[in-house]
Image (tube, helix red, strand yellow):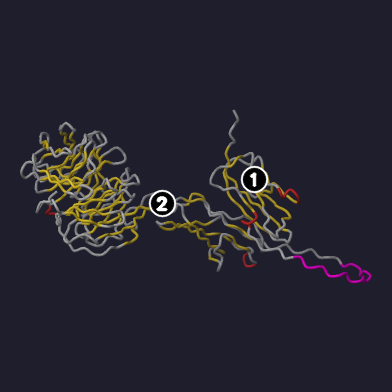
Amino acid sequence: MSTAKRTRKPAIAVLVALCLVLLAPAAAQAAPTLLITEFSAGISAPAGPLEITAGPDGNLWFTEQHGNRIGRITPAGVITEFSTGISAGAVPHGIAAGPDGNLWFAEQIGSIGRVTPAGVVTEFSTGISAGAGPDGITAGPDGNLWFTEFGGNRIGRITPVGVVTEFSAGISPGAGPDDITAGPDGNLWFTEFGGNRIGRITPAGAVTEFSAGISPGAAPVDITAGPDGNLWFTEFDGDRIGRITPAGVVTEFSAGISPGARPHGIAAGPDGNLWFAEQIGNRIGRITPAGVITGFSAGITAGARPVGITAGPDGNLWFAEFDGNRIGRAQIGETPENTALPTIPSTAIDGDTVACDPGTWTGSPSFAFAWLRNGTPIPGATGPSYTLTPADVGQTITCRVTATNGAGSTQAISNTLVPGPKPAAPATPATPAAPAKPAAPAKPAAPAEPKVTPAQVIVLPPARQCVSRRSFRIRLRAPKGIKIRSATVKVNGKRVDVVRGKRLKAPVDLRGLPKGRFTVEITVVTAAGQKLVSARRYRTCEPKRRK
């Protein structure tokens, strides 16, 4: 597209910030986040970074419209610029990886450039008509490179050895072909910035134009193939994102894009969505295949003017900041989502030690615990287990779990527990005094039983998968110095088994469990009277039949 739409400002240092959702959040899923990092070291001023693509060498390559250079940036942010071999005033524009292991770029002066991963540049102009103004470029399904001629109103094809063919038949006058991409149907698709249309050209050069469904004055600018088998394009003047099927059916989306945002570059992301740059809105936008748009701006320096965008080999998004003179990296993340609530025992008394199962979560988080009394955190109670005190009797006790990963944190609260008091000790009847006996020699005192937590004694099966209705094993283990006196098992609050004596050496075996979801609670009493309680929620499944 015309260079008149772009200006420049000096570069600044690297900035990092966590990007928050500013526009419509995605529904029924964890909130997305972007961690934005900006890189300027190594970019000469004024460079005007414009378009960017992933290279065959594992790096990102970009054009510098004002600097008349090609830039390379590693996933770690190390930048190298190349200018040798590029003609003065070439005005590098679109860039794409070629089928030959090199990068190819369009020069609006009237040439196509090739740069090797080592930075060796070759320019090709033979066969390109005067005033063509090559703009966008992409690798085609036929092993060649295809490019748009914004000024020449044509589509060009160049072989890896530099042989050029131009096609104009079927392109309306004043169309202004801008960007081009390979489609899922084996054809090439391009935007007509001036003609307000989307064009399709076969590898044989047959052109078809589509305008139905595109609002007047939309000015389609960039285009990419989507993960849904359609083509997606930006409408620079229309402030919309467009989708066109291989059959030519167009749908436009604008909800979530601010007026005057000027969406420009667009690319398929690693998360199954489309991502685009808002040149004037100074944001990075995401649009799902269903058309839900979310905008992100935190971490992008004011006035940066994002233009080109691409998915990198490192699983991140990379974008060019035309006025900011920087390259930006956007790391996609999602905060943890709770899929099964935390659980604590439903019954316990003063003095019992109860454990908090964190439940199940997405996003591989770490956990932090807080025990609450009537909704208020209990001072010092921040571990996965808690020993009830007289202050808890008759009060509502819950466990709050905070799950955290690189994208952020999410909280969930367990079921409630109302502890009861300790039972009163029975009165002992008086007995007549016995005749005095000689004092027996004193026996050495038995060592005191050490304090233990439920997790040290009770081993419940994990709740990440279903359990058999015929067999369910709870293992009890006695740490050194601990003797277990009894174990009581409840399923959904109903006592189903009491184990004492020698049977404690074997696993507790429950059979005939109910179908569906149930909570298993086990209470262990040690020889010294310690009471340990642990609970976990499960779902059952039918046992496989033997053939």
The relative height of residue 453 versus residue 185 in the rendered view (above or below) is: below
Q: Are marks 1 and 2 in contact (CB under 8 Å)?
A: no
The image quarter in which residue 9 lies: bottom left
Badge 1 density bin: few <14, some 14–19, many ≥20, Cα 10 Å: some
Find numbered disc 2 in the image and state the secondary structure of the residue it sits on: loop
The residue that label 2 is drawn on is 30
Question: Which amino acid is tagged 2?
Answer: Ala
> Tag 2 or tag 1, which sits nearer the N-term?
2
The extreme left residue here reads 130
For image coordinates 73% across by 65% down, the residue present is 447
For image coordinates 12% across by 46% down, the residue present is 123
Left or right side of 353 for 201:
left
* Front-most of residues 389 and 19: 19
For image coordinates 78% across by 68% down, the residue present is 445
Q: Which residues are magenta?
A: 430-446
Residue 230 appears in the rendering: yes
Query: Mark 1 to mark 2: distance in Å?
Result: 35 Å
The relative height of residue 387 versus residue 225 in the rendered view (above or below) is: below
* Front-most of residues 181 and 173: 181
Q: Where residue 15 appears, x then y in whole percent? A: 29, 63
The residue that label 1 is drawn on is 473
Question: Which amino acid is tagged 1?
Answer: Arg
* Front-most of residues 238 and 155: 155
Marker disc for residue 117: none
Find numbered disc 1 in the image and state the secondary structure of the residue it sits on: strand
Left or right side of 339 for 321:
left
**Does the stretch in magenta take in 512?**
no
Q: Where residue 499 appears, x then y in whole percent? A: 73, 49
Q: Where residue 37 appears, x then y in whole percent? A: 30, 59
